[in-house]
């Protein structure tokens, strides 16, 4: 395809527009962000490039009640849900792997920003692992 750059990853070849190459090179892959359920990043047709495992794909894209996802270190690392009661927001995070303390702290910072954006207060961030509760 004219104007495209081919890259190989995960045993497959993918392409992106050559005009986008400078922007892709300037991306901060170390940032931690809470992406909403329908963030455009999660709407890719080729979901296998975002999450390699079928278990994570089923959790991230269920038929009903999509969770948000945490982007950290250039990849998707866990899902999150924002149960809200009135002006109070609690963020429940379900990591797909053990998270370093710095990443958990960055998730808490992002949750605080989300609560402020929603003009509410943060009641806390709960990290769970399939029933096992971990505190930040």
Image: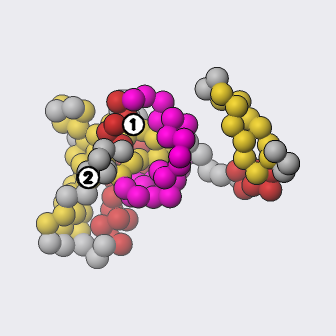
51 sits left or right of 22 in the view: left
- Rendering coords of residue 90 (x, y %): 21, 57
Mark 1 vs 2, N-terminal side: 1
118 to the left or right of 7: left
- What segment is highlighted magenta in the picture? 30-54
Question: Which of the 4 image quadrants contains residue 7?
Answer: top right
Looking at the picture, the colour scheme in use is secondary structure
Counting from the top left corner in percent of width and height, residue 118 is at 31, 73
- List the residue tagged with mark 2: 65
Q: Residue at x 77, y 38 (%)?
A: 6
Pointer 1: what residue?
57
Relative to the observer, which residue lies in front, 100 or 59?
A: 59
Q: Residue at x 18, y 73 (%)?
A: 87
How many callouts does the rendering have?
Answer: 2
* Residue at image location 21% in from the left, 32% down from the top: 130
Q: Residues within 10 Å of mark 1 (few under 14, many from 20)?
A: some
Q: Quadrant of the N terminus?
A: top right
Which quarter of the figure has residue 57? top left
Please state the horizontal and vertical placement of residue 93, each as a whole percent of the image. 28, 45
Q: Does the segment drawn in magenta span residue 32?
A: yes
Position of 130 relative to 90 (above/below): above
Most distant residue in the bottom direction? 119
């Amino acid at each position: 395809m004219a104007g495209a750059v081919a890259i190989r990853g995960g045993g497959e070849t993918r392409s992106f527009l050559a005009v986008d190459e400078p922007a892709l090179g300037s991306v901060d892959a170390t940032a931690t962000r809470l992406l909403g359920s329908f963030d455009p990043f999660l709407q890719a047709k080729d979901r296998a490039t975002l999450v390699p495992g079928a278990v994570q794909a089923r959790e991230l894209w269920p038929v009903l009640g999509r969770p948000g996802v945490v982007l950290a270190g250039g990849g998707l690392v866990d899902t999150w849900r924002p149960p809200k009661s009135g002006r109070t927001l609690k963020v429940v995070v379900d990591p797909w792997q053990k998270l370093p303390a710095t990443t958990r702290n960055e998730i808490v910072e992002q949750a605080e920003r989300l609560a402020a954006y929603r003009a509410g207060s943060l009641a806390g961030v709960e990290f769970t692992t399939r029933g096992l509760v971990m505190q930040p």
